[in-house]
Amino acid sequence: MNENDGDGAQVTTGTTADSAEAAIPELVIISGMSGAGRSTAAKCLEDLGWFVVDNLPPALIPTMVDLGARSQGNVARIAVVVDVRGRRFFDNLRESLADLDAKGVTRRTLFLEASDDALVRRFESVRRPHPLQGDGRIVDGIAAERDLLRELRGDADLVVDTSSLNVHELRAKMDAQFAGDEEPELRATVMSFGFKYGLPVDADLVVDCRFLPNPHWVPELRPFTGLNEEVSGYVFNQPGAKEFLDRYAELLQLIATGYRREGKRYVTVAVGCTGGKHRSVAMSERLARRLASGGIETVVVHRDMGRE
């Protein structure tokens, strides 16, 4: 505000509220299934310069953000790991998130997911019980945890399925999402997959390319993948292929506009065919190029290519 200093001059003084708002740190909440890689994700963010707090009770998250805001810019990015180890405080999470939203805190939620089989193998390999299994089996603890975290998973900005990822691949995903100084408006992952290997659990949208003739039944094309020009040409010369690409790309642009409006920064589009080798691969490549040309930062992942 402006004040007179007694000599007729106008003196401008800033308010502490304005200063505090400018200094509010960016926040990432890391959660997900036990054994899915939360510790690896947290260490990766720490290596990228984030201030990481492990197993912080959700009720204390706003306090942590307030402390960061008073650090005069020294703590600009905070990552908090929230999981079932703090389950008696977990009911406070919704209230804490509402408090953060009211303060205008820029926050994202990262949810680490994995299949039951992968989680069981990991717990058995380290010979440790699941934190929720009690006197039951590991699978009982996993089921209880999924039920407890279901709502949080549904509200997450980014869901990463680590079932088939090693430590280095998970770190690469974290680097891709959080290393940049500036966050794009929207990031998309276009993932090809084979229905016979199961649906991707981290997909936001799933589309089926099995309405197109399968190059698998063309002997000269069978050994190749959808990355091959002849295979791609065969797929897109089929009736309806180009029209499908055009219309679905338009639909995704419409969805992307809504995601931006709602503050969602990440979307995974899964494109499936029978084996994840020919049609879905060719369609994913073309679709990713369309999205990128529309201003959406896009990466392509071929989950099942090479599994046959």
Image: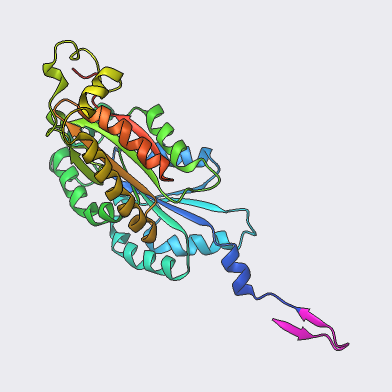
State the image quarter where residue 123 is shown.
top left
State the image quarter where residue 138 is shown.
top left
* Any part of residue 305 in sight: no
Q: Is residue 21 above or below residue 212?
A: below
Viewport quadrant of the C terminus? top left
The magenta span reads 1-11
Q: Is residue 49 magenta?
A: no
In depth, the one of 29 and 81 nearer the eye is 29
State the image quarter where residue 290 is shown.
top left
Q: Is residue 265 above or below residue 293?
A: below
Q: Is residue 288 above or below residue 184?
A: above
Identify the residue shown where x is 25% and y is 54%.
154
Image spot of residue 128 (x, y percent): 26, 34
Image spot of residue 174 (x, y percent): 43, 38
Viewport quadrant of the N terminus? bottom right
Image spot of residue 10 (x, y percent): 80, 82
Identify the residue shown where x is 46% and y is 36%.
175
Image spot of residue 211 (x, y percent): 12, 34
Q: Is residue 205 above or below residue 63?
A: above
* Left or right position of 92 against 297: left
* Any part of residue 28 in sight: yes
In depth, the one of 163 and 297 nearer the eye is 297
Give the tally of numbered discs. Answer: 0
Q: Residue lying furthest right in this view?
A: 7
In depth, the one of 187 and 201 nearer the eye is 187
Q: How is the image coloured?
A: rainbow
